[in-house]
Amino acid sequence: MFTKAQTIAALLPASIEQVQSSSAFAPSNIALCKYWGKRDRTLNLANNASLSISLGQLGSYTEVALSASGQDEVRLNGEWLAPEQAFVQKVIAFVDLFRRGQSIPLRIDTTNTIPTAAGLASSASGFAALTLALNQSFGLQLTRQQLSIVARLGSGSACRSVYQGFVEWQRGERADGLDSYAVPLPEQWPQLRVGLVKVSTAAKAVDSRQGMQRTVETASLYQSWPAQAEQDLAAIKAALAARDFTRLGERAEHNALSMHATMIAAWPPLLYWQPGSVSAMQKVWALRQAGVEVYFTMDAGPNLKLLFEQDNLAKVTEQFGDLDVIAPFADI
Ligand code: PMV
């Protein structure tokens, strides 16, 4: 087993020589083929490869500068946070991986462009933006591939947020994780839209880290997940290459529901759905029955992310009034 510090040591110079102010942006991403379950919980190495779409301008801006006070200072969405807050501790633990014992007090200022009420996780874009900013601040000159590896140490899905567009996270085989990183896919889909259906934006009781661990440890249904995800990934890549929206949507929805089936089969059971999630699913299915091509995907939470094409925007928004619509390729 390798530690995060060992991964970093393989990629970074022995010490940080210079510190400059920097700022970086990374988009949020939504998986169409989900990452669920780790083969290494320390390094966030996935049991299966995954594929996502980045959300253009929705994501995190992070600025890093030397702290004038000599103490680490962390600001989120305009508010300075107390050192004992969980967010600050996560950020500092990640930054410490880069500092490796050197005294380099920093001011880290993150602003999420994801509307706080949109029900989207910001940890993927947050760790990716922080990685990009630290790379500049410390003059590391890491490649995108290395940046993806480092962002993965913050949260698994963050490795996909170092790119826009469709992104595949290759699972890798190595125990040190140096072959587990994201790669951008060449396909563009300007007509593609992602609609955020807000069922609830309350903080969830079980986060994805705990949720996947519980599923892997207790759900016998999980055993079939990695093989299914591999097939889904191949089918989704084929659908992208063929620009076949039906195949893309069907596979993405089926993949998400299969992931949720493994969670429901965990013990204690993990059901992220709320009544509003189910009624939104039923609305999607009714729209499809009526000939409107719309599909959904869901992560470890109650909110739905709709997938449709621009031609159907009016019909979809008519049914889902309060919808944030993202055009992942137009909004870059
Ligand atoms: O990277 P994490 O620990 O936030 O886990 C993400 C898990 C899912 O959102 C459910 C799936 C995915 O691939 O993004």
Image: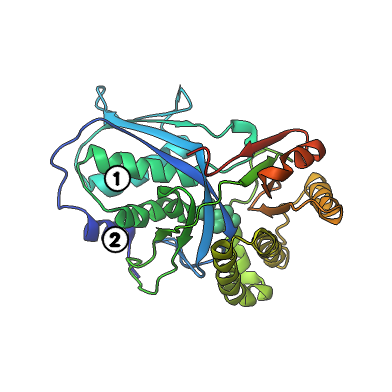
Name the residue beneath numbered marker 2: 7
Q: Give the residue displayed 58% in from the left and 77% down from the top.
A: 227
Q: Give the residue displayed 31% in from the left and 39% down from the top.
A: 133
Q: Is mark 2 within 8 Å of ligand 1?
A: no
Quarter holding residue 19: top left
Residue in the foreground of this view, choosing between 86 and 46: 46
Percent position of residue 42, x then y: 41, 61
Dot 2 crowding, Cα within 10 Å, few <14, some 14–19, many 20+: some
Q: Quadrant of the N terminus?
A: bottom left
Considering the numbered disc 2 on the image, is that residue within a helix, a strand or a loop?
helix
Say if mark 1 contacts mark 2, CB within 8 Å.
no
Q: How many angstroms separate mark 1 from mark 2 (CA)?
A: 13 Å
**Does residue 61 lie above or below 306 as drawn?**
above
Considering the numbered disc 1 on the image, is that residue within a helix, a strand or a loop?
helix
Q: Nearer the N terminus, badge 1 or badge 2?
A: 2
Dot 1 crowding, Cα within 10 Å, few <14, some 14–19, many 20+: some
Picture quarter with ligand 1: bottom right
Percent position of residue 188, x then y: 51, 52
Task: Report the label total.
Answer: 2
Position of residue 227 in the picture relative to residue 156 (left or right): right
Circle 1: residue type: Asp
Residue in the foreground of this view, choosing between 167 and 4: 167
Percent position of residue 311, x then y: 70, 44
Name the residue beneath numbered marker 1: 96
